[in-house]
Image (tube, rainbow, N blue to C red):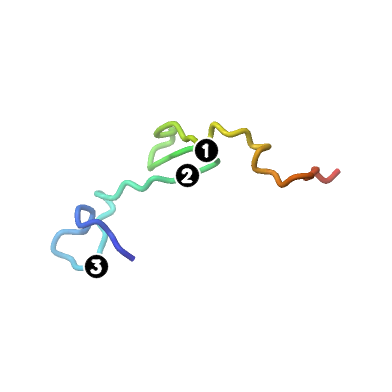
Amino acid sequence: MHAHPDIMMSGVPNRIDPDKWRPLILSFQEFYGLTPRRLQRSELGQIPEAMYRPPGWQPEL
């Protein structure tokens, strides 16, 4: 694993400082972080969900 030096814990080798780390999470085609709100617009979120289905796909009844 590689981590940017800016998020490393001061004085402790091989440790990430959780107060410096701000992950970007893709959840349901939208970007989130450590807050309950969406962070920014996602291009993936603009694509209709049906476009991800394989050709001929039908829901089970």
Corner quadrant of residue 59: top right
Q: What label does residue 44 carry, if any?
A: 1
Seen from the viewer's position, the closer of residues 15 and 25 is 25
Considering only order in the chain, which callout, 1 or 2, is on the residue closer to the N terminus? 2
Q: Nearer the viewer, mark 1 or mark 3?
A: 1
Q: Secondary structure at mark 3?
A: loop
Which amino acid, mark 2? Answer: Leu
Determine crowd level at label 3: few under 14, some 14-19, many 20+ residues with C-alpha closer than 10 A.
few
Q: Are marks 2 and 1 in contact (CB under 8 Å)?
A: yes
Q: Name the residue that disc number 2 marks.
A: 26
Considering only order in the chain, which callout, 3 or 1, is on the residue closer to the N terminus? 3
Seen from the viewer's position, the closer of residues 43 and 3 is 43
Which amino acid, mark 1? Answer: Leu
Residue depicted at x 39% and y 38%: 35
Q: In the image, residue 12 lies at what x, y percent?
A: 18, 66
Determine crowd level at label 1: few under 14, some 14-19, many 20+ residues with C-alpha closer than 10 A.
few
Considering only order in the chain, which callout, 3 or 2, is on the residue closer to the N terminus? 3
Q: In the image, residue 27 lies at what x, y percent?
A: 51, 43
Q: In the image, residue 11 lies at what x, y percent?
A: 13, 63
Quarter of the figure that contains the C terminus: top right
Seen from the viewer's position, the closer of residues 52 and 6 is 52
Q: Nearer the viewer, mark 2 or mark 3?
A: 2
Residues under labels 1 and 3: Cα distance? 34 Å
Q: Name the residue that disc number 3 marks.
A: 14
Determine crowd level at label 2: few under 14, some 14-19, many 20+ residues with C-alpha closer than 10 A.
some
Which residue, as the protein is rendered here, is positioned at the far bottom?
Answer: 13
Corner quadrant of residue 52: top right
Residue depicted at x 79% and y 44%: 56
Is 13 on the left or on the right of 50, as rendered? left
